Amino acid sequence: APADLMRPVPAGVAPSILAANFAQLGEQVGSVLAAGAPAIHVDVMDGHFVPALSMGPQVVEALAGQAHDAGAYVDVHLMVERPERHVAAFAKAGADGITIHVEATPHTNYALAAVRDAGCRAGLALCPGTPVQAVSELLGEFDLVLCMTVNPGWGGQRFLEGSLGKLERLHMLVGDGPALEVDGGIDARTAGACAAAGATIFVAGSSIFGHGDPAAAYRDLAGTVRS
């Protein structure tokens, strides 16, 4: 899809289905979409780049129509080695945006170009130990930059407090063009501080789907990040 026809990267809270009950996945996704979620976040893990294994393109394919019918953006985060090998499959499955890790491939520029060539918005993710300067050679090549606020691949971690300073530095480096996404330990306590540091999109898993009423949890969290 040409850039002007692609869905823009939204601002707001993006519920992560990694924390959903997979026996009720469509129902739980439907509840947060009905509550106004602008994006659904899909965490893809390969057991190599990160220790955990999660889901593949079939899950994106199963949810993309439901998300798009609600006007929402399908936000795929590839925590996989050599992500350029998987871009086409996720684009075909219905991803609107595909985020790759700067640490996961020696060919970051190529991988970002492959995402855009596949008709998706390109995202670049940084692990907590990666300095913000890692994105400086790639300015203009991505639509979103993801600052991991926990180490990817381990669930239920505490938000890394040093992330706030890093977010501010990242925002200064990339400016207001790309979306600035945070992922890890995002809840009502941490989201507002991330927003103040420049974040525009907030991935939240257990703080939404770990709740008895995901739609209510979504609304509460979204209320904390609206300026």
Image (tube, rainbow, N blue to C red):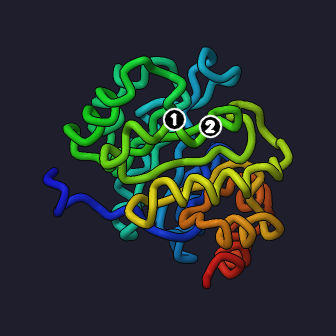
| Quarter containing the C terminus | bottom right
Q: Is residue 20 visible?
A: no
Query: Which of the two residues, 131 or 36, is positioned nearer the viewer here?
Result: 131
Relative to 45, say whether 131 is above or below. Answer: below
Residue located beneath label 1 in the image:
134
Residue drawn at x 42%, y 25% is 83
Left/right placement of residue 143 relative to residue 149 reads left
| Residue 45 pos. (x, y %) | 58, 28
> Crowding near pointer 1: few (<14 within 10 Å), some, many (20+)?
few
Distance from the alpha carbon under mark 1 to that under mark 2: 6 Å
Mark 1 and mark 2 residues within 8 Å of each other at the beta carbon = yes
Left/right placement of residue 50 relative to residue 10 reads right
Residue located beneath label 2 in the image:
131
Q: In the displayed image of the protein, which residue is found farthest to the bottom? A: 227
Left/right placement of residue 216 relative to residue 72 reads right
The amino acid sitting under disc 2 is: Pro
**Quick one: SS at disc 2?**
loop
Left/right placement of residue 227 relative to residue 61 reads right
Relative to 21, say whether 112 is above or below. Answer: above
The amino acid sitting under disc 1 is: Ala
| Residue 120 pos. (x, y %) | 29, 46
Residue drawn at x 83%, y 52% is 161
**Quick one: SS at disc 1?**
helix
